[in-house]
Structures are given as structure tokens and as C-alpha cells.
Image (cartoon, coloured by chain):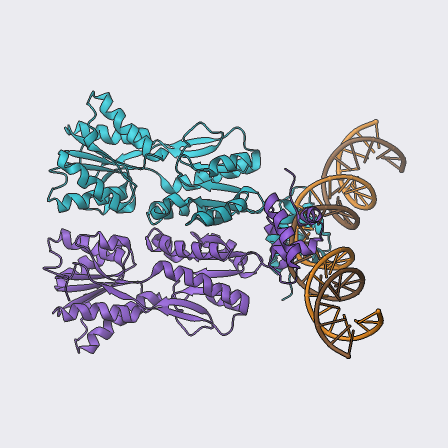
Chain colours: A purple, B cyan, C orange, D brown
Amino acid sequence: MNKLTLEKIAQLAGVSRSTVSRVVNGHPSVKPEVRRRVQQVIDETGYHPDPAARSLAGQRSGIIGLVIPRAFQFLFTDPYYPRLMQGIAQACNTHNYILSLFLFHTEEEEKKLTPKLLRQQFVDGVILSALPTDDPLIPQLIQNEVPTVMIGRPAEALPVSYIDVSNIDGAFEAVSYLLGLGANRVAAVNGPQNTMVGLDRFQGYLNALASRQIPVDESLMVESDFSEAGGYRAMQQILPHQPNAVFVASDTMALGALRALREAGLSVPDDIAIVGFDDLPLAATADPPLTTVRQPIRRLGVQAVEMLIDLIQNGLTPPRHFTAPTELVIRQSCGAKTK
Amino acid sequence: MNKLTLEKIAQLAGVSRSTVSRVVNGHPSVKPEVRRRVQQVIDETGYHPDPAARSLAGQRSGIIGLVIPRAFQFLFTDPYYPRLMQGIAQACNTHNYILSLFLFHTEEEEKKLTPKLLRQQFVDGVILSALPTDDPLIPQLIQNEVPTVMIGRPAEALPVSYIDVSNIDGAFEAVSYLLGLGANRVAAVNGPQNTMVGLDRFQGYLNALASRQIPVDESLMVESDFSEAGGYRAMQQILPHQPNAVFVASDTMALGALRALREAGLSVPDDIAIVGFDDLPLAATADPPLTTVRQPIRRLGVQAVEMLIDLIQNGLTPPRHFTAPTELVIRQSCGAKTK
DNA sequence: CTTAATTTTGGGAGCGCTCCCAAAATTAAG
DNA sequence: CTTAATTTTGGGAGCGCTCCCAAAATTAAG
């Protein structure tokens, strides 16, 4: 089986290279009858254009890069990421892009691979998963005019596109729910305060307290790192200050918090109510099933890709923004199922 | 900033295109002094060769494809995959390959993307994560002579390279441990029996029973699907038949089994002992901490990549095989910590 | 039927590399 | 110092496409 090229297909169909190219790329100006004939030859031979040649000649690679920063590498095993990737991969498939994964573990790796991202030689666009607010990659991408979509809004008002979820509102709703249930000492296990997700969910917590004129108690707030172990430690730290409810900024941390409570011999929800954030599958199977704030993770992945393609095709300005709503999912970790 | 090319670097360094190419590719026959001069220009300008041009001229893409089959898409959120990907990504980074993810959700997607995998146009090689034993992709890859490494050995003795873990021995050790603890009714929650992992771990279970002349009780064996919900259902199904220990073929399923036991009001390990398989992080934080069979998932990812690169560089024959050992990690789900 | 406008087609140039071979430079041998 | 062997260098050809423009074919207008 010798390699098929445009030229060969052209010969077989009795047309020129250019015409075959037009058919392959769905260019309009081809006589319908010719298009049919060419398409038939393509189907029969199973021809597929060489992506490398395409990239070189067309100055586009057809590849989207998903970047997971070094800082949160340890979180990559959180089920959040696979879910996000499923959405991203699915959208890539339907829009004929290839998904490429950039997982940085060390600073050298980051140094080595960053240039591949910055020159559009390799990827047509980049999706950045939640970064520390001061990550240097963002300004670099902006400066090099690489089409970029951030997952989670940036700290400052940078000219960059992003998708996000309404973290502040979601946290507000969750904490308000706890307060409405009668809890008067609601603790917070927060995400890293150098990320917008962490900051925003904390802000929602504060807003909820403020809206009911409840004074802030510093001893009930602990910054953690979105990991199970982090949630566990944070909960242990809070426990002596006698909370009767706790808002945990991620389901995975909530699992850790539940473990700390179990070890302390406390019963959920009788002794203490708990709300998570994310609604990962593990929330539903936790003991007790976790009341949590749902964010449409997979959907977010799909929309990130679609936004990115929009940027690639129609230019970077103005930056696009999209914020998905969250939804409080009530299970059994706060008491009676009915509100 | 106009684009840098080999030619431009050559001009700046006062040498020819070819010489720069040799320096970039580490080709030996360059005078040391010239090499130094050229390297300096490259460093100063920040030149990086265009990957598309390289692919086209060199007939290699520098991309490794990781394929997750449609059949197990629902398992992709299992922490096993991120861990595996971390290993794969890390090895790709150190060996200067780019990792590309192929996640198929529907049959059409599979149809559409398979050709990209089969012609070496797009990827230099493919890593296949655990497939159903009858997946048609394997023979196709073999026939097209695409460098391929399977994660998990194939069903028949196909001429294909793979890495695996000693599933049979690992399961044997786990079940023997349960038997040694005095359990006389050891149940098995198995993985899908159309996968080698599922079959092998079950085989290890059977071997352990056989080695102690314990009769096989069909009512104590249930085939499941490696999911939490699957483990839960399987455990419920087994419970009426009064097992006093259970070997569960994955940690995630073990979590489901624990949930079923908790709901049934049974205490672990007092009423029933349980062993998992994988040693995911969640095993250590389960309630009670799960005794399980450790497989070095991340390491496996690294080795898959290195094996694949070996195939790419040195040819497909003979197929390479590697089987990593497993290790029983004793925690508290089977009773006293000491064996 | 002729000419102009429009649609469709073909082929040259070029994308930025690698590969290969011949030429030039250098080193070793006599 | 001359010639042969070896190392190093340069440039042509080609990888398989896209892009663009000019030419050919077709259709519309008068």
C-alpha cells in the first residue's frame, strides 16, 4: 500500500490537485458532479490528508493544548480533571481538533515546553486549567497573541477569554442554606487563596454571613489545598472551635473533612452539617451522601473548546466570557432531605 | 518579531542551513567551535524548529497517542487514569514527545479518529489503555505496523508489545492473605470478564482457593464493571450468601462494597474482611483504611512510553513485554495490622 | 450569435524542515 | 611536501499540502 497523496487522488479522479484540496476542505466552488466523483475516489481509497503537510502549508496545526500547571499537579488525580477532559475531548472530536496534554511536573519541563505553546507552531490554541493568580504563563500567552481560554477567571481584568462558574453565588447559596437550617457557627474549609476559585468561594461564604449580619470568626476559617488530606487537616484544626456546620470548598476536601469528623466521633448531620462543592460522583456515594454545589464540569470543558475555536476563527478581541450557573444539590449531610 | 527559520539562524551564525540542522538535532559531525557558535545564536534568538516542517520532512511527528476506548469511557473518572497519565506525560516530556489524548465517546468518533491513528501520519506510536479482549483496534494497529504498547496484556498471544502487572499473583496473594486470616467463605467481586485484568485477577482468586483445596462457591462470585456503583451492587448481591471475607478487583469497587456493607449494618473487619486492588490514594483514606494490592500505576505509564520509544527507534520485532510486580499493602480492612 | 460576467479549474510558488550526496577543509600517512 | 583518508560543510531535492492568481469553461446579458 503506497502512500496516498492529493496528487494521486487527483489523477484517479481526473482532476487537479487543487480541486481535490477544495473537496477535502469543503470549499464551495466545485461543480457538484465533480465533487461527487472526487469524494467517491476519496472514500474508496480511504485517503486522509497528511496533517503535517497541512500544518506547514496552512499555518495551522489543528491541535488544541490543555495545560495543567505544575502548581496543581498533585490535584490532577482529583476526579474533576478527567471529567473536564471528557468534555474537552468530546468537543475536540466533534470539531476535528486533536487534544494534546501538557502536564508539567518540574520547572524545567515547564521551561522546555512553554515555547511550544507560545509560538503558534505547535498548537492553534490553549486551554488553561485553574492557575495560581500570579502564573506567568498568562501574560506570556496574551503577549504572544496565542488564542487562550482560561478555566476560571483571572485575578486582574486581563484581556483574556475565560469560562467560569458562579463560585461566589454558589458558595453564598450553600452557606445560606446552612444558616437557614439554624446553624450559627458555620466554618469554612477554603481552597488555596492564591487561586480565584479559592478566593471566590470564600467570598461567597463571607457574603452569606454578612447578609445575615453574622460576625466573622477567624478561628472557623482555614485555608487548605483542595486535597482530601488537606480537608482532613483543616477540619481537625477547626474542630476545637465547635462549629455546628461547615462549608467545604470542594467535594474532595469534604471527604477529608468527613473522615476527620468520623475519627472525632462526631455524627453528620446530627452533630455537624457539611456542604461540599463540585458534585463529583463521589459526593453521592459518600457517607452520608453529601449535599453540595453542582458545577457542570464536563459542559465547561465543551464550552471551553467552543470558545477557543471561536477565538481561533474570529480573532481574539474582544475577549469572550462565560459564567455557568451552579446548583445546590441537597442530599443528607445537612439533615432532613426537605428544605 | 518575524519568524525565525533554520535559514535565518544559519545566516546569523555564518553557516549553512544544514549545519544548523545538525546542531539542532545533535548530529555529531560538527566542528565543536562551530557548534558552540551556532548554539549561541539559537539561544540568543530563542529559535525553535517548526514541528510541522519537521514532521513533513522527517516523516515523524514526535507525538504519542494515548487511546482510551469507548467501552471504558465511564471509568475514565477513576483516579487510575490521571495517575497513569501523569506517568505517561512525564516520560513524554523527558523524551521530547508530545502527548495526545484520544478519548472516544461514540462509535462515530471512533470511526472518524481511527484512521489518524493507523497511518503514522499523525502519531509516531500508540499507547492503548485496557481494552476489551476483542477490541478491533489491536489487530488493525498490528496490521498497519503502528508502534503500539498495550497497557495490560492481550487475550491471545498477539505479536504486540505490552506492559502489565502481575494481576494473577497479586490477587493470589491477597486472597491467600484472607484465607490465612481464617476466612473460609471468601467472595470475589470481579472486574469485567471481557478484559484481561478482570480475568487475571479472578484467576488469582481461583488459584488461591485451589491451592488450599477450598471448593469454589459460585454464589460468592459476581462479575462487575470496576465502578463504585458496580461494586456496591455486587456486594449487595453476595451478602445473602454470608461471606466472611471479600476480594474486590479494584479499589473503586471496594469503596462501593464498603458502602453496601455499611448500609447492611456490617462492620469491617469484624463481620467481614475486605481487600481491594490498585492502592489508589482513596484506599488509604477509606473507612476503614483499605488493605489492597498495590500496582505502580504511574511507573507503568513511564515504562509504557519508554517501551514505545524503543519500538519506534528500534523496530517492532520482537514484541517487548514487561510485567511489574504487585505488593500487598496491609491496612485495617482485614483486621489486626500485623499479619 | 457575440460579448461580458461569473463560476470552476489548474499549476506555480512556497511553507520550513530533513536527507543525501558532492565539494571543501582538515588531518594523517609516507 | 605530496597524496590519500577523513572530517566537516553546503546546497539541491523533496516531504504533501494551501494559497493565490491566471486560464478555461460556463452562464447570463444584449
Please identify the quarter of the rendering in which residue C21 is found: top right
Quarter of the image where one finds residue B323: top left
Q: Residue at x 39, y 37 (%)?
A: B132
Q: Is residue B288 visible?
A: no
Task: Locate residue B109 relative to residue A49 in the image: left or right.
Answer: left
Q: Compared to B163, does A337 lie above or below?
A: below
> Residue at 24% across / 42% down in the picture?
B231
Q: How many marks?
A: 0
Q: Which of the 4 image quarters holds residue A145?
A: bottom right
In the picture, which quadrant includes the N terminus of chain B? bottom right
Q: Image height check: is A161 above or below B198?
A: below
Observer-nearest of D27 and A4: D27
Place of residue B303 in the rendered image (x, y in percent of width and height, measured from the top left): 44, 38
Q: Name the residue located 64 percent from the left edge and 45 percent from the top edge.
A: B58
Residue ID at (44%, 53%): A104
- Percent across and percent down for residue B70 are 40, 45
Location of the C terminus of chain B (image quadrant): top left
Q: Is residue B250 among what the camera can see? A: yes
Q: Give the x, y percent position of residue B10.
A: 70, 55
A107 or D11, which lies in front?
D11
Side of B94 relative to A15 (left or right): left
Out of A131 and A56, give the one closest to the viewer. Answer: A56
Q: Position of residue C4 (x, y in %)?
A: 78, 75
